[in-house]
Amino acid sequence: MIAFRIPAIRHSLLREVAPCLRTSQRRWAQVHDIRFVASHRKPDDVFEKYREKLARKAKEEGLSDVEELKVAYKENIQKQRDEAINTVLPSSTSSSSFPPRPLPPIQTEASAEQALSGIKPSFNKPSKPNGVKTLSSYIDIEKTRKLPQKEIEQIWRLRHAHNPQSLCAVIPEPTYNRIVATAKSHPQFILPIPREGKGAEMHFLEWTFPTPTTVTVIFTHLAEYRLRGEYSQPHTIVSHHTDLADSKGLVLLQGSVTEGRGVSVEEGKWLLMCLQKFYTAGHGNDGRKRLLEQFTRGDFAFEINKLLEEAEKIT
C-alpha cells in the first residue's frame, strides 16, 4: 500500500517535568505526536461559560432566570438546528464513488486531548424527520426505477449540477452497506483537512438516521463543536438516499458545503473521501478500524499523528 508518512515527534504528557521535543521535518510538514488524554466535559459547561450574558438576556426578556430563558427559546433553538441539518442544497458533478485525490503532507499542533475534549458520544440517536428532504423531493422514484443504472447516475448528477456548492455521488450498495454498518457502531469521529503551510484542521462528523431511507452525515469545525456543543453550526451536510438500493443496487448521495463557513467544496469532497476510507475499514486496513474503535471508547492509545497518516494514504 502506497502511503505518504509523516515523521513523528515524540514526547510525553504524563511526566511532571516539561516534555522534551525532538522535531523532524519533511518539506513543510511537521507533526507533534501527542498522546490522547480523555476528557468528558459536561454539556452544561457551555451554559456556565455564558451564564452571565444569558442572565442579562433573561432579565431583558422579563424572565426570572436562565432556566426560564432556556424553556422560552427551546422551540426556536430546535427549529434552527433542524433547519441547519435538513436544508441540504443540491450538489455538483462527481464520480460514482468518491474519487481519490492526493494531498500534501500534513502538520498539526492539535493534540488528541484538544481534539476530543468535550465530545460526548451519542449512539444512533435519530434526529427528528420534520423537514428532512427525502429522495422523492428530487426525483420521481417510481419512474427512475425503470431506468438503467448508467442513466440514473447521469440524471442524478445533472439534477444537482447547477449549484457550485454542491456535493454529489452514486455509491454501489455493497460499499454503502459497509459504511452504514460501521456508522451504527461509530456514529461520531474526527477527520483532518490539510492546510498547506498551516498544518491540519480537525473536523467533527456525526451520523444521524432521520428516516428509514435517509442517512445524514453532519460535519462541523471541531473547535466550534468543542465550544458550542449541540449549538454549533455545521459547514457540510450530506444525505444518503437508499430508496433505489434494493431494486437498482445504488445509493444516491447529495449534500452541500455552506459558503462562508471556512471550508471549500474541494475540501468537502476530501472529507467524504476520508469518510469512505475510514468507514469501510476492516477490509484491508486494520489501522483505520483501530482508530475508529479507540475514538469511540475514548482510548488513551488514540493518536492524532496516526489519524493523519491513515487519512493521507491513497488507498
Image (cartoon, helix red, strand yellow):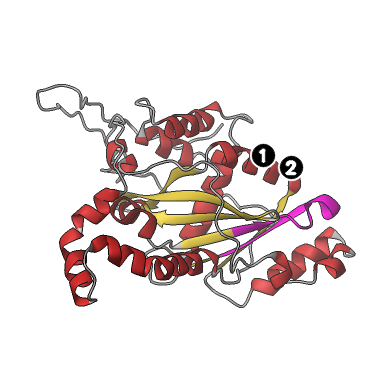
The amino acid sitting under disc 2 is Pro
Q: Is residue 40 left or right of residue 186?
A: left
Q: Residue at x 59, y 69 (%)?
A: 131
Tag on residue 174?
2
Residue 214 in sight: yes
Instruction: Name the side, left or right, on which 40 lies relative to 158.
Output: left
Find out whether the residues at labels 1 and 2 contact each other: C-beta distance under 8 Å.
Answer: yes
Q: Is residue 254 magenta?
A: yes
Q: CA distance from mark 1 to mark 2?
A: 6 Å
Instruction: Say which element carries label 1.
Output: helix
Label 1 sits on residue? 178
x and y, in percent, of residue 169 in the image: 66, 59
Q: Residue furthest top?
A: 15
Q: Please tell me which residue lies in front, 128 or 67.
A: 67
Residue 315 in sight here: no
Q: Amino acid at mark 1?
A: Arg
Q: Quadrant of residue 210?
A: bottom right
Observer-nearest of 220 and 310: 220
Residue 129, percent from left and from top: 60, 61
Point out residue 305 in the picture as x, y percentages from the top left corner: 36, 35
Q: Position of residue 99 (x, y in %)?
A: 61, 53
* Residue furthest to the front: 64
Q: Which residues are magenta?
A: 239-255
Residue at image coords 38%, 71%:
260
Label 2: few (<14), some (14–19) or many (≥20) C-alpha neighbours in 10 Å: few
Which SS class for mark 2?
helix
